[in-house]
Amino acid sequence: MKKLWSLLFCVFVSSALAQEGLFSKALLALQKGQAKEASRLFSEFLEINPESESGRFNLALSLYRQKQAPDPARAYWRQVLFKNPYNSQTRAALNSIKDKKYFWLWIPADLFLALMVFSGVMVLFLLFKKKLGSVFQWTLFLWVIVHAFSAYYFYHRFENYGSLIQSCQVFSAPSSKAPVLFEQEAGALVKVQDKNSSLKSWSQIRISPSKIGWVPSAFILPIKARGF
């Protein structure tokens, strides 16, 4: 029994060291400017450890540095951001390739936070001075306006968006017998085109202007309720 546990421990340690070595090798290739080799190594690493956030981020970075169209990199960065919306490094990467969807997403939240701080300081200042005049009224008015704008944005801007729960094939028609157009990975943000369709079990999605197809509705997780 002890030999079995020792063998399992050795296998576990060897696997962990192999993953660490592969990641380090890929990172070194990326630092040397060998983006193509780095993307290959990071892809191999993700096959072993598909939940690695840093692996997915660096794979996107290596794809982007190959001076290809930004779509592959954007897809992986969006997957990272979906799992961790507060990943500032990924937000900055998406902003750098003009991913306006995520850039504008955070503006109302940042404005709301800044105005909350400003309102709190102003209220304390006016209470200290005992002058609740027009400045306080204008501050309250601006606070209400920005609050309403933020609420509207978060509850309506992405009401027709969803994220794929798992990787799936995208069909040309709402039928599993229809031709397969392409395969989409889990975590991808999609625009639900046919929201009010009578085909409740199927949803038409759009990944880009040239990528429109049908997937089972069960594969899509609406993100409106997530406050995304």
Image (cartoon, rainbow, N blue to C red):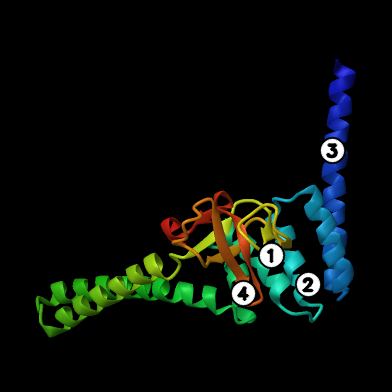
Residue 90 in view in this figure:
yes
Look at 53% across and 75% down and name the residue there: 101
The residue tagged 1 is 76
The tag earlier along the polypeptide, 3 or 2, is 3
The tag earlier along the polypeptide, 2 or 4, is 2
Image position, residue 113 (x, y; %): 37, 70
Secondary-structure class at tag 4: helix
Secondary-structure class at tag 1: helix
Image position, residue 205 (x, y; %): 58, 65
Q: Is residue 159 above or below residue 138?
A: above
Look at 62% across and 74% down and name the residue there: 94
Cα distance between the residues tagged 1 and 3: 29 Å
Cα distance between the residues tagged 4 and 1: 10 Å
Do residues under tags 2 and 1 come within 8 Å of each other at their CB atoms? yes
The residue tagged 2 is 63
- Which residue type does callout 4 highlight? Leu
The tag earlier along the polypeptide, 2 or 1, is 2
Depth-wise, is mark 3 or mark 2 nearer the camera?
2
Do residues under tags 4 and 1 come within 8 Å of each other at their CB atoms? no
Depth-wise, is mark 1 or mark 3 nearer the camera?
1
Cα distance between the residues tagged 2 and 1: 10 Å
Question: How many residues crowd mark 4 within 10 Å: few (<14), some (14–19), many (20+)?
Answer: many
The tag earlier along the polypeptide, 1 or 3, is 3
